[in-house]
Image: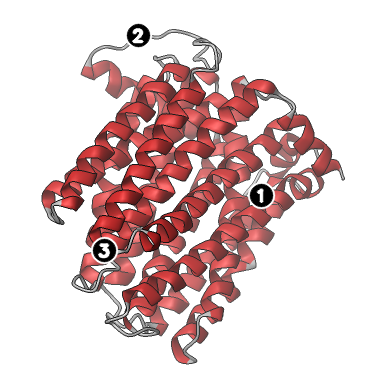
Amino acid sequence: MAALGNLRAVLAVRDFRRLFSVRLAGQFGDGLLQAALATFVLFSPERQPTAASVAGAFAVLFLPYSLIGPFAGVFLDEWRRQQVLVYANLLRGALVIGVAVLVWMRHDGLDLAVSVLLVLGVARFVLAGLAASLPHVVDGPLLVTANALSPTAGTMAVVAGGLAGVVIRAVAGGGDTGSVIVLASAIAAYVVAALLATRMAKDRLGPDEDTVRNSVLGVLQGLGEGFRQLATHPVAGRAVLVVIIQRLAFGALTVLALLLLRNTLNSVGDPDAALGQFAFVTAAAGLGALLGAIVTPGRVRRMGYVPWTVVAVAQAAPLVAFGTLAGMYLPALWPLIIAALSLGFANQASKVACDTLIQREIDDDYLGRVFALFDVGVNIALVLGVVAVAFTSPESGIAPVATVMVGLVIAGNAAWYHGIGPKARERRLAGG
């Protein structure tokens, strides 16, 4: 009941609802974009994915931005974040037009990779801006509820966009033409997100203090300041590390599930069946994230950040390992769904706690660059998880050793976080 009351209280804040709507529209567009690219690159009859191609796709999508992300964080602490949300959403809509042209021309080489890289780079910039803006519209004890609702609902919007993209493509007749129509829908979603951002005042989302750094040296100094903030605030730094390790496991499970569904559980010549089942696994991960967000605020207030995060992460270790192994050897889809549900729950529970700790521990003047650094770590971990499994597993996806290792990584993460201190401070911050 308390959690429901906090949810109503958060949604009663007008500017939170406005910021929330920008997130939902933009991330729905992200889901449409991902669906279009997945169907074009990984789930088309003439393009059978290998472990190397899967790893390469993830590396192109996430790793290059990780090299420039910290610089984006500095600018988030200099520019009006409301203006960033308006113009960045319009920019990525414009960039997707170029992606759609390349897909229409059936280009799947370096030109497409660079175009997608630019779109996703702007998308990650927007997400960092949304996270840094949140404390300006919600504060006090409701911040943990806002942190549970916002990214989780965003994740669900991505899932919904992805499923909608699959349906739109099928209704459009499939093929590359269907992918182009899905991309057009993504462009519309980004324009809507930009228009929604205009409903907030230009100075409403901060930053609180204007700090101008126009030189490369200034950007590098800002990057160093972001690192120092995490180093001098160990409560936030430890929570960041927990989430990063969980993302490593998520990347590994993603590539195992993709290879199993595409090359083992379904006929190689039937990519649509594999795509449909992958959508079910993705939806299960999204549902797990939703459950984690619903449960976490109340559990944090009663148990504290560290004990609850340990419980949430620890439950995933056996379920991910046994579920993925059962999916390989039965073979069947439902164990993979259970594994995805469990890991989605663990990842979102730890993410909610981490976001709140950062916002409470780090001064607003540094929030943009700290969240950008956090985003970089998450992206690198995702790619490392994908690459580690892709290049140590057969294309069938039947990789018991890799699966057990993923389970051990998750269990080790929970054990490490349980053993560190000081836990009393995390409990006090939780209000418990």
Q: Amino acid at mark 2?
A: Val
Picture residue at 47% right of the left edge, 58% below the top: 163
Labels 3 and 2: the sequence-earlier one:
3
Residue at numbered disc 1: 293
Residue 248, can we see it?
A: no
Q: Residues within 10 Å of mark 3 (few under 14, many from 20)?
A: some
Q: Is residue 137 left or right of residue 285?
A: right
Q: CA distance from mark 3 to mark 1?
A: 36 Å
The percent position of residue 49, horizontal first and vertical second, equals 24, 71
Picture residue at 36% right of the left edge, 22% below the top: 87
Residue at numbered disc 3: 175
Picture residue at 40% right of the left edge, 82% below the top: 401
In the image, residue 63 above or below residue 418: above
Badge number at residue 106: none
In the image, residue 409 above or below residue 117: below
The percent position of residue 234, horizontal first and vertical second, equals 55, 37
Q: Quadrant of the N terminus?
A: top right
Q: CA distance from mark 3 to mark 2?
A: 48 Å
Residue at numbered disc 2: 212
